[in-house]
Amino acid sequence: MTVVTLDDWLAHLASAAGDRVTIDPALVAELAGALGADEAGLRATLLDLLDFHAGSAAGNGNRGGAGHGDLAPAVARAVVFGSVTAVVLRQLGAGALPAGVLNAVANLLFSVERAELTTGDPVLHARVPGTVPPDPGAAGLADVVACLDRAGLTRGGEVVLGPRRIRLVCRAPVAGPKVFISYAHEDDGHKETVRRLAELLVRNGIDTDLDQWAGAGRQDWQAWATSLISQAGFVLVVASPAYRRVGDGFAQTNDNRGAQAESATIRDLLHRDRHTWTAKLLPVVLPGRSIDDIPLFLQPYCADRYHVTELSDAGIEDLLRALTGQPRYVRPELGTVPHLPPRSLPRPGRS
């Protein structure tokens, strides 16, 4: 079966030249056919979304021509999946909503993450948040919630839509844990890298506490850290040479006092209940760091550690899977033991 992912294939749906954006009508027609959507309505939706995401005056001409360059991939992706979302919601029963309202509220509650056009039925993989976003009184939001709920998708599920039998697969919402990040203030560069990691986690639904976000008021940092470590579902210990010295007890009295206090608290909790805290303490190795920067009390070589290959969603995937309990591979269901009768051996003297 041939699978064409819209994420890549339709990245060239739109092109920009100066302040004018054009779309490829052939690709629009092909997308409309795959989704069982009205071509003119889909084109209008695409142009609305191009205006919103690209901030440009959108035109409706043929793609190409001298000087036309590709629109930013992130913008193209947002436009394509935003239009797919609008089509799906109309097929779920939200078609009575004005187009502008539907396009404005659709991605608040429902967003396509991946779409596949196959030789059989199209398959859309989507995400439905576990909670209603702020401003529930926004025009049309309640109608979108209602149509998703009627289809049984607000808690994850699957439904077949339209004459083209589009399979819509929604993954169940996953509740993010409370996370505390413990790290040593090596230098400004290390602090910035840790903050970027924390921002990535928050954008992916992980409720993260970091000292750089603690506010401008005076803090009792020991009490602050002890309280948050005790309440956290997970504590991320960011590996670095300074944290290794602190964790192993080789730091001087005046070195990294905050990290010394935090690591002492963490060591004590681990000693008191090793089973619980071994699972809650996650050593994190950032780009440019080494497994040798993990303190020995966290067992860098005989327990799991989490390498962040780059500061991106893809780079923190293994860490996100650990924090949200979503394994990369799942054991298949246990099958039936086959009946294997003995094989007959030839009698002596016979060929």
Image (tube, helix red, strand yellow):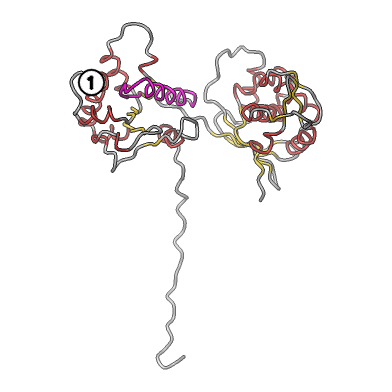
Image-based side of 99 in relation to 131, left or right: right
Q: Secondary structure at mark 1?
A: loop
Q: Percent from the top left, x then y, of residue 326? A: 45, 37
Say which residue label 1 marks.
Answer: 255
**Viewer-side residue, 335 vs 224:** 224
Quadrant of the rendered structure where residue 146 is?
top right
How many numbered marks are there?
1
Give the quadrant of residue 76: top right
- The image shows residue 55 at horizontal and vertical percentages of 68, 18
Q: Is residue 1 above or below residue 170?
A: below
Task: Name the spot of residue 59 as percent of width and height, x first.
Answer: 79, 23
62 over 141 or under it: above or below: below
Q: Which residue corresponds to the image point at 38% horizontal and 10% vertical from the top-left?
A: 215
**Residue at 34% in and 21% down:** 187
Which x, y percent locates residue 330?
46, 45
Could you tell me which residue is drawn at 37 percent across and 7 percent down? 216
Q: Quadrant of residue 33?
A: top right
Q: Which residues are magenta?
A: 181-204
Badge 1 amino acid: Asp
Q: Choose between 81 and 127: the one closer to the eye.
A: 81
